[in-house]
Amino acid sequence: MTPTTGDRRRTTSVPDLVRDAREGHLRSVARLVSLVEDESPLLREAMAALTPYAGHAHVVGITGSPGVGKSTSTNALVGELRRAGRTVAVLAVDPSSPFSGGALLGDRVRMQDHATDPGVFIRSMASRGHLGGLSWTTPQAVRVLDAAGFDVVLVETVGVGQSEVEVAGLADTTVVLLAPGMGDGIQAAKAGILEIGDVYVVNKADRDGADQVRRDLRGMLAMADRREEDWRPPIVRTVARAGEGVPEVVARLDEHHAWARRTGVLDARRRRRARREVESIAVAALRGRWAGLHGHASLDRLADEVASHRTDPYAAADRLLAGLDE
Amino acid sequence: MTPTTGDRRRTTSVPDLVRDAREGHLRSVARLVSLVEDESPLLREAMAALTPYAGHAHVVGITGSPGVGKSTSTNALVGELRRAGRTVAVLAVDPSSPFSGGALLGDRVRMQDHATDPGVFIRSMASRGHLGGLSWTTPQAVRVLDAAGFDVVLVETVGVGQSEVEVAGLADTTVVLLAPGMGDGIQAAKAGILEIGDVYVVNKADRDGADQVRRDLRGMLAMADRREEDWRPPIVRTVARAGEGVPEVVARLDEHHAWARRTGVLDARRRRRARREVESIAVAALRGRWAGLHGHASLDRLADEVASHRTDPYAAADRLLAGLDE
């Protein structure tokens, strides 16, 4: 059985989909992820049905600038995890693309190495951004993959911009990838990645400048304001294309997971993730209500007044909120 | 008088600041922008006081990947606009940086060309992200600069990721910068910039590959799903460092502005901008209320239940919203 993102028209009940997904039917897993991506009306029922089964996967975020070798590294990690007998789901989140066409094309290219392996599920997800964006969709897609029983869920994002950093920060363990020749010295500081990495990987370590990247990174990490003081993030050198260093990355991920579990950091992160998710869903629900409001408190009318400088935005927001209570 | 971002401790009333800003005191303009950046409690009063004076500036968004020459192009545009006798405010928004230290350093470097010109105000703004992020702060900072009387407000963002595209999309006119050798062919499609540009600029046009970038872009624009069908975005070639092509960019900006005004597109965009701003402020207010909730509907308690898989996130969001009404 191979993963698929197509065939969304088939009508199957949510309980059937959840049961099939938990029995390892990748097609059902894919359809549940599609419910998330499509912001389906069935999503609510699906999340309720999946919730009791969630909480077992190690959720690993992987982020880095374009060109550092994220796809190659992810594929190499998948291979290494499979050799250790673990099942793996990859969720490639593309915050910069509101188009799913590109994402699907990406899937096909990326799946080649693992196409015949039923223990691997790979799926790209675009953010249509209708509702809460990535902070809304990512945790729900992760819940699908977690509840489906995968041992490890890899969430890959492009590490530029705040939303991506946020997505990466929602994982149990976050891997930040760098590579020589990418101008990452400056980019690292800018993108806030010094705050979010639990494991740093300098990929393309056989190239000139890799040692310099590592030294710069070490120096910056020493000065950075880290969220947890007693985990010193390791820096691993890899040549992902050749598989070099990849076993060490997996070892460090496991170390971090064990440490986070032991210290309560894992629970704290999961609470933070849940907090943002609940808030995002509530905000999306409110946006729906606001869009449906009529009369003097309707969002369209208030926007008109602000755009024509008759009302200031705070007064308009007050009236919008007051309209909710009417 | 030179712009400054310092001296925030001075206590001046909001009406005084607004009056001074409108009289051309750049220091007061800077302090009003700081109120936005700092998410000051005075912001509400400031926005109400500024609102009657806003609506006259041409708000131009400038976006592009790192390395295309955004700062150089912005500086060249400022110079050209000044030669035409227009006053210019530049708001450099850095969505990837939650740190304002870097932004301030950037200011100093960037201001050199225009440091003694009272008709130019340049300010970088970091997103602390405490409240609604860039969609929250950018329109308010633009309102300050608009109400202060600048003829043109240039909003410069790094064009990677959805939030940046959104910020750029909030302008009256959006300029998308590209350059040869940046891999922009693929990046352009990914970042959604094909949907948001009103004027495209291929900078570094004296380099190899510039014509190819232009051809690729023209081909992609022909296929893109444009938001307005009757404006065909021009592609201008520039060498910003030498000022080449910059007068043509200004001419195209003016053309777009006139077209947008004539067709109602300008009003529609401003309503959309206001809509998002009002919504962001309302959401920020709700987040504040949620954070203060106690008992069974408190966000912390709900997040706990979701993180431990006792409640699904939709049920939790329902209870959060119900708690608002209690």
Image (cartoon, coloured by chain):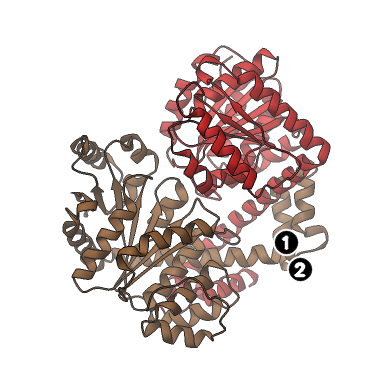
Chain colours: A brown, B red
How many other residues sit within 10 Å of disc 1, few (<14), some (14-19) or many (≥20)? few
Callout 2: chain: A
Residue in front for this viewpoint, A269 or B301? A269
Identify the secondary structure beneath mark 1: helix
Query: Which chain's residue wears label 1?
Result: A
B325 to B8, vertically: above or below: below
Q: Is residue B42 visible?
A: no
Residue ID for mark 2:
A326
Q: Which residue occupies the foreground of this view, A115 or A266? A: A115
For the point 72% across and 36% down, the residue is B49
Q: Quadrant of residue B173?
A: top right
Q: Which mark is residue A151?
A: none
Residue A219 place in picture, x, y as percent: 22, 37
Q: Amino acid at mark 2?
A: Glu
What residue sits 39% from the left and 43% below the top?
A191
Name the residue rendered at 57%, 43% in the picture. B193
How many other residues sit within 10 Å of disc 2, few (<14), some (14-19) or many (≥20)?
Answer: few
Q: Are the residues flagged by discs 2 and 1 in contact, CB closer than 8 Å?
A: yes
Q: CA distance from mark 2 to mark 1?
A: 7 Å
In the image: residue B130, left or right of residue B227: left
- Residue A282 rendering spot, x and y as whole percentages: 58, 67
Q: Secondary structure at mark 2?
A: loop
Decide which of A78, B225 is in the foreground and name it. Answer: B225
Vertical relation: B103 (above or below) B251: below
Q: Residue B164, image x and y in percent?
A: 54, 43
Classify the position of the N terminus of chain A by image quarter. Answer: bottom left
Q: Give the residue number, with chain letter if any, for mark 1.
A: A322
Identify which residue, A181 or B164, lies in the foreground: A181
